[in-house]
Image (cartoon, helix red, strand yellow):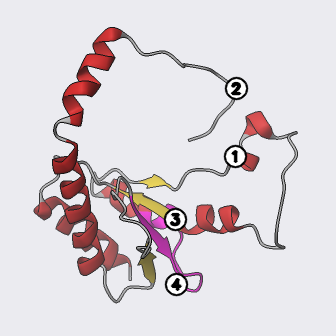
Amino acid sequence: YQHEEIGYNDRMSNRCAGIDRGQVKVLPLRIQQKRAIFERYVSKLYGLPLVMQPSLECAASNRWLSVLLLNKDCGKTPAEVLNALNDANIEGRYLWKPMHLQPVFADAKYVTVATDSVSDDLFSRGVCLPSDTKMRMEDVDRVCEVIRKLF
């Protein structure tokens, strides 16, 4: 996602509000599905030179995104992973581009707390894997097969 200009869309139509209210009823199921997809990725990609986002003891992630982070020395790039997925007709995405790298904020001040930027590092090694709740576990397995073939 790249932002070329600042925009505001702080409204919600009555129709969208009604749809959202209906979705709240199935939220626990959706979270369960997202967590199951994530756990399948974790088990099927085990042993590869990458990590999935860790769990924190103080929180319970809804696993809205399933993101893999390539090890720095793995010899692969997010572009290579995404190209392999694309060749198999599977959509993946880069991890979100940090705000300080967005063209719309090119002249904005950027505060750093260390020599190496954490957000730059994550962006350079992260891949968002498909995790739609309509996915079957066979779909997740297919994504994992494509990734495993890269290593």
The part of the chain drawn in magenta is 66-81
Residue 32 horizontal/vertical position (percent) = 19, 57
The circle drawn on residue 99 is 1
Identify residue type, mark 4: Cys
* Residue for point 66% across, 62% down: 119
Q: Secondary structure at mark 1?
A: helix
Among numbered discs 3 and 4, the one appearing first in the sequence = 4
| Quarter residue 121 falls in | bottom right
User: At x 84% / y 56%, what residue is drawn?
Assistant: 111
Q: Quadrant of the N terminus?
A: top right
The residue that appears at 60% across and 66% down in the rendered structure is 122
Q: Residue furthest top?
A: 14
Q: Earlier in the sequence, mark 2 or mark 3?
A: 2
Give how far apart the Cα atoms at labels 4 and 2 are: 35 Å
Residue where numbered disc 2 is placed: 5
Q: Choose mark 4 or mark 2, whichever is in front.
A: 2
Q: Amino acid under label 3?
A: Gly
Q: Is residue 89 left or right of residue 57?
A: left
Identify residue for label 3. 126
Image quarter of residue 104: top right
Q: Secondary structure at mark 4?
A: loop
Decide which of tag 2 and tag 1 comes sooner along the chain.
2
Task: Please identify the quadrant where the C terminus is shown.
Answer: bottom left
Q: Which residue is mark 4?
A: 74
**Mark 2 Cα-neighbour bin, 10 Å: few <14, some 14–19, many ≥20:** few
Is label 4 or label 1 in front?
Answer: 1
